[in-house]
Image (cartoon, rainbow, N blue to C red):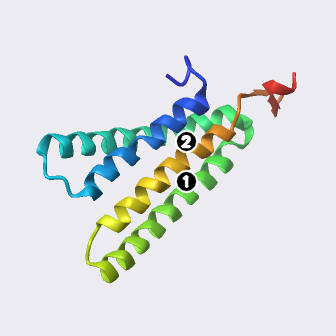
Amino acid sequence: ALDRFPAPIVIAVTLGLPSIGLFVLASGLADPILIGMAVTILGLSMGADADILVYVVMRYFPVQIFSTVFGLVGAAFAFSTALGSLILSFVLKFTGSYSGFLYLSSASAVIGGAVFLLLGHSSIRDGRMASANAE
């Protein structure tokens, strides 16, 4: 899909979809089919995020600095995972429920996916980033 459709839209949808699964889990619904679908959506999106990160770095940055940029992106990914675990611990301690954290994560997934819509269409030429809109 990243090669056939505008990448920012595909990325926004792919990274925004987990919000549905997180919202379903937070709502407390007990339907096994609905819960199974929510977990499936979460799993598919989690499997896609690493591929998407590599694609974005390759598409929007010169290949000469790939390892540096991807290292920074990976570090930010790891930091946000640790921060999320810390926030989960505090929310669970003070509320005794996972629901608040799941609602917060659902909103964060929508916002995080939407941020990728700001990327626009770019291509790499001569080792520098050139915006296709500027041509």
Give the SS element for disc 2: helix
Determine the residue positioned at 64% across, 46% down: 67
* Mark 2–mark 1 CB contact (< 8 Å): yes
Q: In percent of the image, x 43 and y 62: which residue is there?
A: 104
Residue at 32% x, 46% y is 21
Q: Measuring 42% from the left and 74% from the top, which residue is drawn there?
A: 86
**Residue type beneath disc 1:** Gly
Does 10 sit left or right of 89 as displayed?
Answer: right
Snapshot quadrant of residue 57: top right
Q: Is residue 46 above or below residue 132?
A: below
Residue bearing mark 1: 74
Which disc number belongs to residue 28? Answer: none
Quarter of the rendering occupied by the C terminus: top right
Residue behind mark 2: 53
Work out whether 114 lies above or below 85. above
Q: State the image coordinates of residue 115 (x, y, percent, origin top left).
A: 61, 46
| Secondary structure type for disc 1 | helix
Residue 25: horizontal and vertical position, in percent?
Answer: 26, 54
